[in-house]
Image (spheres, rainbow, N blue to C red):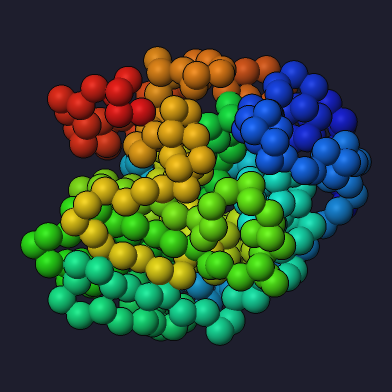
Amino acid sequence: MTKLPPEQTPKSAESEKTPNPRREFLRSAGLFTGTVAALGGGLELLSRKPGAEAQALPDLIGQAKRPLGPYDTKDAVTPYEQATTYNNFYEFGTDKADPARMAASLKTRPWTVKLDGEVKKAQTVDIDTLQSWFPLEDRIYRMRCVEGWSMVMPWLGFPLAGLIRRMDPTGKAKYVQFTSLLDTKQFPGQRSSVLTWPYVEALRIDEALNPLAFMAVGLNGRALPGQNGAPLRLVVPWKYGFKSIKSVVRITLTEKQPKTTWSIAAPDEYGFYANVNPKVDHPRWSQATERRIGELGRRPTLPFNGYADQVASLYSGLDLKKNF
């Protein structure tokens, strides 16, 4: 495995110049318990392969088509090794290296997804059946974390809009709620009270129907690794990364706006919308710039993470400072 120069590793780039603001929040709240692990994480990151080695999926790669336009970017793709070893996935632990170290505990087959709520017929479907409903697409999206770092990720999956339409919503459906797997045996991080489990996220239904909203089953042409949210995760590239919930087991259409995990943990810091917005700072740090993993300096953050032409109209007339 190629050893990266220390100054270019994700761990060093983040830890030397940028504090981990959410871990600071957890520490100040008396919830963070991973100090020792965090101190050792940097060295481990340089020498460890992902805990769940991804499997090649040549059949899926053959099916995937990469549309032009907003589903691609000229930005350099983040190397697979970095994209799979520097992750926020608190179900495995609060350190960036914990997901890759612990992901082997996640069993992604058998796996079912419950589709219910304001639908004409609720159902529970096996992940392979669900995946077979749609032709897979290969999309390269920018990903911006609320903590101020970013990556460029090549996802394999299908548009969320197709799944929503297949669920056959009733006239009352206004929101889409996503729920992650709750299983303390597979997710050791859920044994702590760092967040309220299971992890829940949600979108307005018009956001979910936007062509950019995506359900990923693969990364870099391989099966999605556990640490990146296998076997099924949401990807909403114009929002901060915590909105893109991982390891989804339930999708529920609702009439009322659902409570979401981070907005419950810190409602003054993490809003329902979480749109990438360089003009609206987090209460404890600026969102004007970001550090692209693998780069030394910082770059300006783009409104809606560079997807304003595709999504800004969704929020016409909405005060984005109040609805952050």
**Vertical comparison of 26 with 249: above or below:** above
Question: In the displayed image of the protein, which residue is found farthest to the front?
Answer: 30
Residue 241: x percent and y percent?
Answer: 50, 41
Left or right, 226 with reference to 232: right
Q: Residue at x 71, y 51 (%)?
A: 93
Report how many numbered discs are placed on residues in the image: 0
Residue 269: x percent and y percent?
Answer: 47, 28
Residue 277: x percent and y percent?
Answer: 40, 24
Q: Residue at x 36, y 28 (%)?
A: 324
Q: Nearer the viewer, residue 131 or 39?
A: 39
Q: Is residue 61 visible?
A: no
- Residue 183, by quadrant, is bottom right
- Residue 11, by quadrant, is top right
Question: In the displayed image of the protein, which residue is found farthest to the left?
Answer: 171
Residue 60: x percent and y percent?
Answer: 50, 72
Q: Residue at x 30, y 81 (%)?
A: 123
- Residue 263, by quadrant, is top left
Q: Is residue 157 visible?
A: yes
**Vertical comparison of 123 with 52: above or below:** below
